[in-house]
Image (cartoon, rainbow, N blue to C red):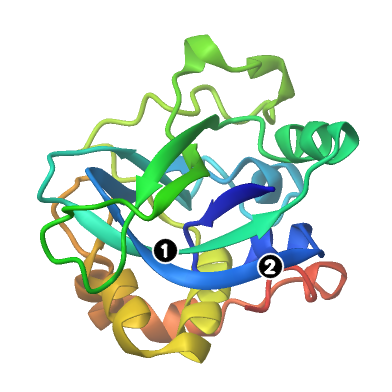
Amino acid sequence: MKVCIDLILLSFLSNFFELQENFRHVRIRGKRRVFAHPHLFLIGEGVVDFPNTLKAASLSAEPAPPDISFVAAAFEVDLDDSQREAFIRREPEYKIDTTQFYSLDDENGSEALGEGVICLASTDADIEMIRKPDSVKSVWNWAPDSGLLPLSLYLRHCLLAVEKVGGSPLESFLEDTYLVDRQTTLAKYLKEHKEEVMNSLPPPYLKDRFSG
């Protein structure tokens, strides 16, 4: 049985692994959740006119100081070799690694509940750049002042998912998720852009995958 960590709380990972068990919300410590790289799949599908628009970013987690944390979802799943390979093919840009997770009530991170698989930021040198869309010259080399912003269609999908959950997971998603500058919270970004984000609908053939 393998524990997986879903950064969006209730979304593509949990849908990808159909036979999941023990789904719960946990806290990830020493990692930052950030919109810091282009969404390769949606750019490849032609859904976003990249790089003419920089509203193209997807989520990942990255190493951060110990006081940085966020709420995510953990669930358990049995993976055979074909499922493991399919997952890696689906997420080629990430560093697939493990991280400890903690109870939401554990304010000091004194005792980890366990360890799970998580999608972490990688580097261009460590991924197969041949698998990226031609318009993406760099996946992971985006500076804090680059102007890269969340891809609205994808962010809508994330928000629909976390709003179903509510409570501390939703609060964490808004306050503990950052733009590429690592300063602007998602909550602050949405004060000006939420209407645009929520009106960004996926094409019909992606409706089931990107509707929360």
- Residue that carries the numbered disc 1 in the rendered image: 72
Above or below for 121 versus 160: above
Q: Who's the residue at 42% across and 33% down the image?
A: 121
Rendered view: 116 above or below 167: above
Q: Mark 2 points at which residue?
A: 21
What amino acid type is highlighted by mark number 1? Ala
Classify residue 84 as left or right of residue 39.
Answer: right
Image location (x, y in percent) of residue 163:
46, 87
Above or below, 122 against 76 in this view is above
Image spot of residue 116 (x, y percent): 50, 45
Is residue 97 or residue 139 the one in the foreground?
A: 97
Badge count: 2
Query: Spatial distance from mark 1 to mark 2, Cα to Cα?
Result: 15 Å
Q: Which amino acid does label 2 sit on?
A: Glu
Local packing at callout 1 (Cα closer than 10 Å; few below 14, some 14-19, many 20+) is: many
Residue sitting nearer the eye, 76 or 68: 76
Q: Is residue 128 left or right of residue 151?
A: right
- Specify which label sits upstream in the sequence, 1 or 2: 2
> For the residue labelled by badge 2, is the local secondary structure a helix, a strand or a loop?
strand
On the question of residue 80 being in view, the answer is yes
Residue at horizontal 19%, vertical 73%?
A: 188
Q: Write the residue at 53% across / 22% down.
A: 137
Q: Do the residues labelled 1 and 2 touch (CB within 8 Å)?
A: no
Residue 177 sits in quarter: bottom left
Q: Return the x and y of residue 206 as percentages of the image width and height.
A: 80, 67
Q: Is mark 1 on a helix, strand or loop?
A: strand
- Between circles 1 and 2, the one closer to the viewer is 2
Q: Nearer the viewer, residue 125 or 20?
A: 20
